[in-house]
Amino acid sequence: MSALITAIAARGDTGRSPALQAYLRRLVGPGLLVAVGYIDPGNWATDIAGGTGYGYALLTVVVVASLLAMAIQSLVVRITVATGEDLATLTGRLLPRPLALLSWAAGEAAILATALAELVGGAIALRLLAGLPLETGLVVTAAATLAVLTLSKHRAGLQERLVSLLLGLVALSFVALLVAARPDAGAMARDIAGAGQVLAGDTGALLIGLGILGATIMPHNLYLHSGLLAERLRDLPADLRRSGERQALRTATGDTVLSLGLAMLVNAAILIVAAASLTGGDFTVTSLDEAHAAMQVVLGGVMATLFAVALYAAGQSSAITGVLAGRMLTRGFRGRESRGWLRGIVTRVIAVAIGFALLTRGGGHSPDDLLVLSQVVLSLALPFALAPLVLIAARRDLMGRLALGRASIAAAAAVTALIIGLDLWLLADALL
């Protein structure tokens, strides 16, 4: 994948110096780390709900949400390459202090919500695989994440390889599940053709579609992506950065598009498997547990086990990148980086405590309710990262020749307003 991305970036360029080649290679990899956030357990819950409830119709929403995510993450790439700084640092420096603190708090809330989703997803997977109670699964999943962070301390390359391995496991698992599910191409085409009518005529479909959107575009991924790129741009000669700016933008954007394209295919596969194998039978699927039980009936025990393994891998890989995102956030807003292991412990202790409280209070919430709750928090936090991103990208004094033009600014502002409006609608529906 690395070779493919650098080859795309090199298209039309000749005579690149070895120093520039090495520079461009350094920009490949952050997109893959960001991509795992797009297939976390929160995405699984919304994709399965869409597939079981409305067949293949909401595939269009998965594709549109993924394309929006690619555009927004590519904008993150642009501001980072242009300024050499990450989004958290720029936001903390350029916004009035009260607004900067609010953006920081929203980012921390998003990371905590994501940690809750990852722990709940891991706990569900362990219950399906080993019969562990949910509360025990929360603790075991949290401990496993901390163990990985401890073993890979001061070895960022190991973390990247581990995340890539877990992402590959999820992707291969759903290739096998797709083959076993045998989706009907004709039914898929008919459902996709009627998607607009479904979304316009069914409030439930629209709300699930908004949930897919909220689960796809995550605020902490914006901070993570820019922070990882900014790290790789450091200590480079200014003249090399200026001369290689366009090539760097193409390389990092290619890394982003290809990585998020893979995440889009995984999300599409989750929805297709749900639509093909979890509808039309003598069962009702409203949760990940019920999806697993239905798969045992329709696809067999091996495929159901593969589903649970992939769920655990998705949650664990997202947990690793969530801790990395927290480091970027505190480094940008606070001015110094927090210790990864300490942040990992504190975040997981708080998330486990919240999970215990919500699972046991007043009869308890279902684990799938907690996944939905995490997506609501992400929806609320998104505007505090997205709006500063667009404002920064429009500033020519910061961006130089990579500043957005008027048409691009208008399009970015319109997309931002649309996403904020839809997310607030989803939030209002969840609370009212």
Image (tube, rainbow, N blue to C red):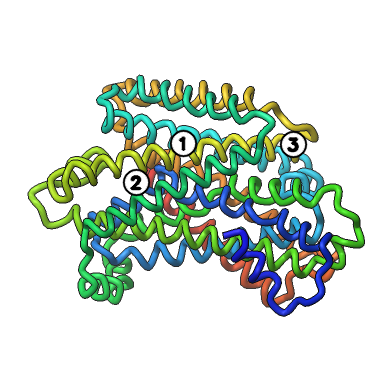
Q: Secondary structure at mark 2?
A: helix
Q: Looking at the image, which residue is at 21% across and 62% down?
A: 182
User: Can you name the residue that lies furthest to the left here?
Assistant: 282
Residue 216, x across and y down, in percent: 47, 53
Q: Looking at the image, which residue is at 53% across and 43% down?
A: 163
Q: How far apart are the alpha carbons under marks 3 and 2?
A: 32 Å
**Residue that mark 1 sits on:** 316
**Residue that mark 2 sits on:** 45
**Residue that mark 3 sits on:** 331
Q: Do labels 3 and 2 touch, CB within 8 Å?
A: no
Q: How many residues crowd mark 2 within 10 Å: few (<14), some (14–19), many (20+)?
A: many
Residue 9, x across and y down, in percent: 68, 69
> What amino acid type is highlighted by mark number 2?
Ala
Residue 432, x across and y down, in percent: 37, 43
Residue 291, x across and y down, in percent: 23, 44
In the rendered image, which quarter is residue 254 located in?
Answer: bottom right
Q: Nearer the viewer, residue 6 or 195?
A: 6
